[in-house]
Amino acid sequence: MLKVQDLAFGFGAKPLYEKVSFIVGKGQKVGLVGPNGSGKSTLLSMIMGKETSYTGKIEVMGNVVLVPQEIKYDPIMDKAKTVKDYADPENKFLDYEINKVFSGVELKVDLDHDPKTLSGGQKTKLALARALLMNPDILLLDEPTNFMDTAGKKWVMRFLSEYEGIVIVISHDLDLMSGSIDKVLAVTPHNSSIEEYKGTYQDYVRLKKQKEDNLKRELEIKSRHLKRTEERYNTSRAVASKSIIRRKMERERENLPQLPPEFKKISVRLPEPKRCGEIPIRTINVAKNYGDLRVLKDINFTIIRNERIALIGPNGVGKSTFIKILMGMLEPTSGEVIRDRELSVGYYSQEFETFDFTKSPMQIFCEETGNNEGFARAFLGRYMFAGDKVFQRVETLSGGEKTRLAIAVLTGKNHNLLILDEPTTYLDVMSQRVILESLKEYKGTMIVVSHTPEFIKELAPSKAYLFPEEKMVFWDDALLNKVEEL
């Protein structure tokens, strides 16, 4: 069992949590949701005992294992000589049992491989596999499916649904295990609390919408009443009456319900894209080989100014390689890339975040875009960077917040071509919506890779380039079935 009572914690003057209490019983499956940067990962660290500067009480009964969003430093992994030593340190499992879990989390690596040489994504999958094999009483998972295809995500969620211990999971793929979740803990930053919703993830979505609709209706009713009171104040001539009405107005203002920040619409126009020719970029017979392995063959790709093209195909068929060739980051083995002389490309990929982590979002945005702080504050506000958040060091931001900052910087410039490689990685539902609404307003040319069908559909591409077929087709919503094929 896990019991949290009167928990309070914060960075600086702004609290993350105030008087938070909840209980998770044996065998419960809990979805922990909330905006990026609202303190979800911090809460898991507190439960693990890694973050201790809080007040209140956290009682943990049983052993706990945490799999973080990214494996930046794991001393146990660094000491392990082989993948098997790390995944099964007590040698409890047969090789085929370990490989079965590896296959489920889509980790393709030999058991005698040195774990220190793995990529970041592979290390995260290895840490997840180790946690599942350890079978702890309480399993804490922070975005466990970020580096997985749909099959891997479904395997993990199915495994967790049958897990006998407590599971608390942060994930933007919660809908995959909705039938298994019996409780949702929703972090609400505007009042530093955690709200509890019993039932599945779909139940949470429905109940939260009802609550928000009721809150908006209450605000509308009280606002109308306040307006009538103000009208009476303005028309009254008696000093005594005006004094009574004024006090009543003050009480009514104090009693207006507090709306979450996501209800507030921030309108900031995106810069007009820099003018360029009719064909910003095209390729002629582009091929790419790695030794005897041919990744791309004779690609003829043309995008017309202001078109939006989705690159669609399973992982590992060359989409990211093709993008890097378009960007000039890779040289093709043969063929030619022709770029308009006025081409200005904004490129996003989770692999290539180049921020100075010692700077703040405000500093980075102003330096990158050349805008002043007034414009930057409004623009970053649109991307959910409010209050002192614009002055935090980037190193303290969550993965989703860094993604939002990267897209904010891209759209804050006047690029005439955006190339976006999986821009929804790490993003919660609200962050996906914020970025989507901004990109929908973008008036330039766009090439996008995403395995989120709703995201692609709302961007309304005019064409799709299919891999590994390597052919251009006009957009049809039937292609959304291919978007999820990984």
Image: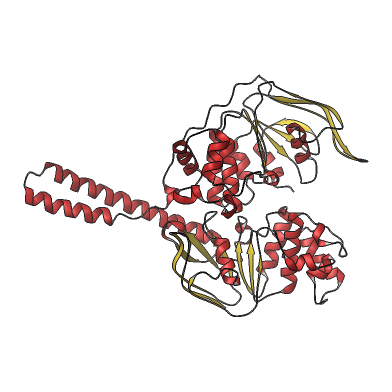
Name above or below for residue 22 compared with residue 227: below
Q: Which residue is located at x 67 percent, y 60 percent? A: 144
The residue most toward the front is 358
Q: Quadrant of the N terminus?
A: bottom right
Q: Is residue 41 above or below residue 397?
A: below
Q: Is residue 472 left or right of residue 253?
A: right
Residue at image location 34% in from the left, 51% down from the top: 217
Q: Could you tell me how many numbered marks the image carries?
A: 0
Q: Residue at x 72, y 59 (%)?
A: 124
Judge from the rendering whether residue 15 lies leftward or rightward of residue 297; answer left or right: left
Which color scheme does this rendered protein use?
A: secondary structure
Q: Residue at x 28, y 51 (%)?
A: 221
Residue with the most extreme top position: 277
Question: Front-most of 137 and 217?
Answer: 137
In the displayed structure, does residue 26 sit left or right of residue 12?
Answer: right
Question: Which residue is more in the foreground, 357 or 324?
Answer: 357
Q: Among all residues in the image, which is located at the extreme bottom? A: 61
Percent of width and height locating residue 72? 70, 58
Q: Quadrant of residue 190?
A: bottom left
Percent x, y for residue 133? 75, 71
Residue 316 location, x and y as percent?
80, 45
What is the x, y in percent for residue 462? Answer: 64, 30
Furthest residue in direction right, as rendered: 292
Q: Quadrant of residue 159?
A: bottom right
Relative to the observer, which residue lies in front, 192 or 186? Answer: 192
Q: Is residue 252 visible?
A: yes
> Can residue 427 be seen?
no
